[in-house]
Image (cartoon, grey):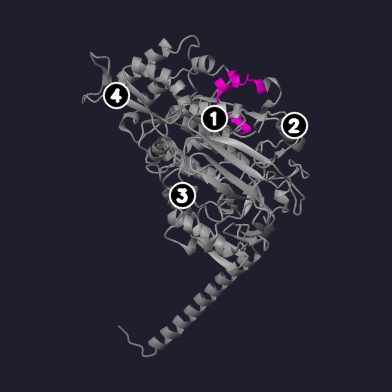
Amino acid sequence: MNHDPAAPATRILLLQRQVGIVGLALVMVLGFATLALAEEKIIKSHGFTEFGDLKYPEGFAHFDYVNPDAPKGGEISMAAVGTFDSMNPYSRTGRSGALASEQFESLMVRSYDEPGSFYGLLAESLEYPESQDWVIFNLRPEARFSDGTPVTAQDVAFSHEILLEQGLQSYRDAVRKRIPRVEVLSDHRVKFYFTPGISRRSLITQVANTSVFSKAWFEADPDNRRIDRPRLDPGIGSGPYVLDVVDVNQRITYRRNPDYWGAEVNVNVGRHNYDRIRIEYFGDSVAALEGFKAGVYTVRPENSSKNWGTAYDFAAVNDGDVVKVTLPDGNLAAPAGFVMNLLRPVFQDIRVREAVQLAFNFEWTNDSLQYGLFRQRHAFWQDTDLEAQGAPEGREKEVLEALGELIDPAVLDSDPVMAHTSSVDRPTDRRNLRRAMKLLDAAGWAVGDDGVRRNARGEILAIEFLIDSPTTARVVEPFIANLKNMGIAASLNRVDYAQYSSRRRDKDFDMIFASYPLDLEPSTELMQFFGSEAHEYSVFNPAGLADPAIDAVIDNIIDATTKDELYANTRALDRLLRAKRFMIPVWYLDVNWIAYWDMYAHPQTLPPYSIGLLDLWWIDADKSAALKARGALR
């Protein structure tokens, strides 16, 4: 081996040159990156929407659907059924009073006449890059809490962080992974950072719609003012109403804050027209209806077909003092039905779930118990462009094909699962019962000499319906009778409202009646409703559903950048959810039933996505005085 004394120096020189070249390259890369960041467009706006354009321009005077000259004054009174032991709507225990969260405002509010659009409330504007890697909210300097103290960026950051520390676990887990950091830039500017490498769908709206609390109020007594514990003191909000009277399990009254900071803000013009909002509590729905007849409260959204069909023939209706109206509803009717807890071993066989579905007779129930007023639900996105129909085609089929072995191949060329049909003449449809019993036989649940089904280990096939309402009991009892005819040891357990809330929260049930508040532009909320990650404890996923194919499609929905992509993936999700058969779809309405004492008025054309009882209607002072003068109302 030759030894060259100059070699080390030469090598060092070469190394220095190489390092120089690398360093220059690194500088150039960083420079280009900095230049790219500098050139990324920053969007500043008065509102936000995921798809398309905002309807209302910057500086708009008011929403089109309000009456900007609506008079202020009077009281709206409504009913609540059950009990409450807290005025903290975010507690993980107990049951909060009606409208407890209404005192707290958010940075932005939703428009009622365009899906998925939000406009500034506490925030006058927002700023974000095209990448939506972060968002800055610019707060209105005039925003105030009800005690007169200013709403600041510190309050916004504190509200986000205390919900992550003390809120529901499923909420904490989901939000912390997506929104890792919040930064206070100044008293009126707050910045949220979003996790790199994940979809930006609904991240801005997530933080824009978080309630804002007073940091000073919580920190004055942190041990007794926790988010996760019940308390009768709701705390301090910035909304138009403040708590006035709490009579536990009797009534709650909210009064207008005469010093409300946001009365003239454009998104509030023509809204919040009552001086008081009163909620009267009743032990059951029968007592609540009688209270309305007697004028104890004056507005009643009706949810019972029996009542709507038969109960409004009392004197005040006949005399014209009480008005019955059917108002259109452009919202997606929340998919509701009897939900099976998939964490229970008995429901982990889809043959059992299908057999249980077949025991429900919608046609007879609707005709005999509900006066034929409802329609049969088939889909989770019923009667919308997001509903799966026929065999999958186009982009929807491509979505399903990409799932490969995660799904049953039959899904690719079959119509979606539809609710079965039953005989309207009698509660028991023998054809469906025979089919159901064959499924149970195939699943290994054999009928014993006593007529009860058992598996090979001798365990009884038992199902308990957990309910808290006598109205639900009317519908469940014939359903239970059909299950018993099939050899299932079915039972009905009606518990008080507090126990029901606790058992539902803990997933301590076999079946309950539940609904999913889905959206016309679905996004990250689907992870909590149907996703695997928190399925064992999420109160928003009552079925405990966990399926990798469904997780994958939810990810696609969250990643969607166009409406076509969103709709195709949502149709695929609708098809997969229906195929899982974890919910027995029941009835739905595409209208609102409202009865009220004739002292209210509302805009001539109501918006499609809210009838606005609490914030768009107002008192007609002359009609109110006339009712009282006649002695119809006190």
- The residue to which callout 2 is attached is 626
**Residue 49 seen in the current view:** no
Q: In the shown orientation, is residue 92 left or right of residue 631?
A: left
Residue 257, numbered circle:
none
**Contact (CB < 8 A) between labels 4 and 1?**
no
**Residue 602 seen in the current view:** yes
Going from the N terminus, do you reach mark 2 or mark 4 first? 4
Image: magenta residue range: 297-316
Q: Residue furthest left?
A: 457
User: Disc 2 marks which amino acid?
Assistant: Ala
The Cα–Cα distance between marks 2 and 3, rounded to whole angstroms, is 49 Å
Going from the N terminus, do you reach mark 1 or mark 2 first? 1
* Position of residue 45 measured from the top left corner of the image (x, y, whole percent): 69, 56
* Picture layout, residue 105 above or below residue 84: below
Going from the N terminus, do you reach mark 4 or mark 3 first? 3
Q: Residue at x 46, y 17 (%)?
A: 361
Please name whichever residue, 412 or 549, is drawn nearer the observer in this view of the structure: 549
Q: Residue furthest top?
A: 425
Q: Residue at x 55, y 60 (%)?
A: 214
Q: Secondary structure at mark 4?
A: loop
Please name whichever residue, 274 or 407, is drawn nearer the observer in this view of the structure: 274
* Position of residue 477 measured from the top left corner of the image (x, y, whole percent): 41, 20
Does residue 541 belong to the magenta stretch?
no
**Contact (CB < 8 A) between labels 4 and 3?**
no
User: Disc 4 marks which amino acid?
Assistant: Leu
- The residue to which callout 4 is attached is 461
